[in-house]
Image (spheres, helix red, strand yellow):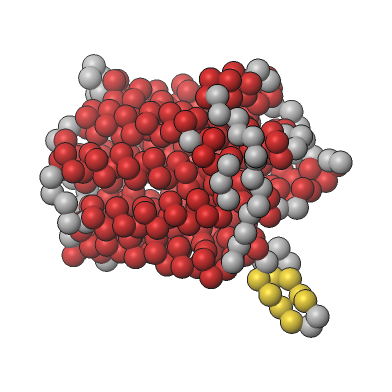
């Protein structure tokens, strides 16, 4: 518990990492509510599995571009200030989303929320890195992800078993309220981040070229993108499969609860292992487990509950990857200058994984049955498994 509570002159006080953990818990709980119903909500507007994939992919492309375009703004701003503003505006727009029934207004709102989320993610990631001990980046990332995933376990259960009975609008209202709670907690925690670059690296293409000019950064980028690539299968396409197989909407919440549960128990221990022994073998084993899970889901696609069980098993592999891939990227950097310059480009790995995970299956659905999505994911996961062996094995305790 030392990482969360520190003793000062006989009294106990929450550390900055603990405060950030509670902030991320409530904002992640908000996101988990909306993501539980998002695929079904989109299909209500678009009436097609392929269109759901294509539009979701469009939003991810927009986020990808935003990460580069907004880097100068983030570099020259106080991370704490820009994070709190983005958080507040997201809460407002989700509240508006709860009363909207117009497709055009939905498109405008979803675009605005997407851009704000890119700002929020980048600013929060740098704040976490600045508040972390240099030798315990993986451990600190593990704490943050544990709180994050606790929210992602609870959220789908609340949305699927309780809120959905009152209609989708109440899910968005609840999500908005949780965002505001996260905003208030962040403000009263008085977390400051003075890591401001006076000279911003504003050339988007130069940032991109510089980032990919290093082989190790390229590998960290691709391995990082694989995490969100997997979650598209779980949060977008598998709920559509469940609905097509006649399962009730509430069952989506139960499945997503089960898929996130292993992360709570396993992410922190795996992050500590990575910090002590390096993450290379965890990368390989994590992607191998996900590869097996996706392959078996295809084999047992007609036995829907067996297929879902294998996908839940895949979360064990993701517990090895989520906290360690970003920590690995930070371990490759030499100073705060590189952190400010390259964290924005690295964060586009999130969107790269989402883009590939959404658009490739959407295109596949135009020519092949739904079940072949799981083979497509397995093939790409195989590539990520093989790439894992090219990673540098960095032991944080030995860094100087």
Identify the residue at image location x=23%, y=28%: 50
Where is residue 149 shown, x and y percent of the image? 50, 55
Q: Quadrant of the N terminus?
A: bottom right
Hey, which quadrant is residue 304 in on the image?
A: top left
Viewer-nearest residue: 205 or 142: 205
Assign the C terminus to one quadrant of the image.
top right
Q: Residue at x 68, y 66 (%)?
A: 15
Point out the residue furthest to the front here: 198
Left or right for 367, reference 226: left
Q: Is residue 212 above or below residue 302?
A: above
User: Which is nearer the eye, 326 or 370?
Assistant: 326
Asked if residue 218 lies left or right of residue 110, the reply is right
Find residue 349 and report its horizontal and vertical position in percent.
Answer: 52, 31
Q: Is residue 311 visible?
A: no
In which image quadrant can residue 143 be found?
Answer: bottom right
Is 31 situated above or below 296?
Answer: below
Q: Is residue 328 above or below residue 221?
A: below
Where is residue 312? Give x, y as percent.
44, 46
Where is residue 131, by image quadrant?
A: bottom right
- Residue for point 13% across, 49% down: 101
Q: Residue at x 58, y 60 (%)?
A: 20
Instruction: Give the answer, above or below, for where 202 lies relative to 247.
Output: above
How many numbered circles are shown? 0
């Amino acid at each position: 518990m030392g990482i969360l509570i520190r003793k000062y002159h006989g009294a106990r006080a929450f550390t900055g990492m603990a405060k950030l953990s509670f902030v991320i818990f409530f904002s992640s709980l908000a996101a988990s509510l909306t993501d539980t119903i998002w695929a079904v909500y989109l299909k209500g507007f678009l009436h097609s599995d392929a269109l759901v994939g294509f539009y979701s992919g469009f939003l991810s492309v927009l986020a990808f571009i935003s990460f580069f375009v907004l880097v100068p703004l983030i570099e020259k701003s106080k991370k704490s200030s820009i994070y709190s503003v983005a958080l507040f505006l997201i809460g407002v727009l989700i509240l508006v989303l709860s009363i909207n029934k117009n497709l055009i207004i939905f498109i405008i709102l979803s675009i605005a929320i997407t851009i704000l989320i890119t700002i929020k993610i980048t600013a929060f990631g740098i704040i976490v890195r600045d508040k972390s001990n240099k030798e315990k980046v993986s451990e600190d990332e593990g704490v943050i992800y544990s709180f994050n995933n606790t929210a992602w376990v609870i959220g789908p259960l609340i949305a699927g078993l309780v809120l959905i009975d009152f209609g989708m609008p109440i899910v968005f209202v609840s999500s908005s309220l949780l965002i505001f709670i996260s905003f208030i907690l962040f403000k009263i925690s008085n977390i400051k981040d003075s890591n401001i670059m006076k000279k911003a690296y504003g050339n988007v293409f130069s940032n991109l070229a510089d980032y990919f000019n290093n082989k190790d950064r390229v590998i960290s980028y691709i391995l990082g993108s694989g995490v969100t690539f997997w979650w598209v299968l779980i949060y977008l396409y598998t709920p559509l499969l469940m609905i097509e197989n006649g399962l009730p909407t509430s069952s989506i919440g139960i499945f997503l609860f089960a898929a996130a549960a292993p992360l709570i128990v396993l992410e922190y221990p795996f992050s500590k292992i990575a910090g002590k022994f390096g993450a290379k073998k965890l990368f390989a084993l994590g992607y191998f487990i996900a590869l097996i899970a996706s392959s078996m889901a295809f084999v047992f696609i007609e036995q829907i509950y067996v297929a879902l069980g294998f996908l839940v098993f895949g979360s064990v592999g993701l517990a090895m990857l989520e906290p360690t891939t970003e920590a690995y990227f930070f371990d490759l950097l030499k100073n705060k200058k590189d952190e400010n310059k390259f964290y924005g480009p690295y964060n586009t790995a999130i969107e790269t994984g989402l883009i590939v995970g959404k658009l490739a299956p959407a295109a596949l659905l135009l020519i092949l049955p739904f079940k072949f999505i799981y083979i497509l994911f397995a093939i790409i996961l195989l590539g990520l498994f093989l790439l894992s062996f090219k990673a540098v094995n960095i032991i944080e305790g030995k860094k100087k």
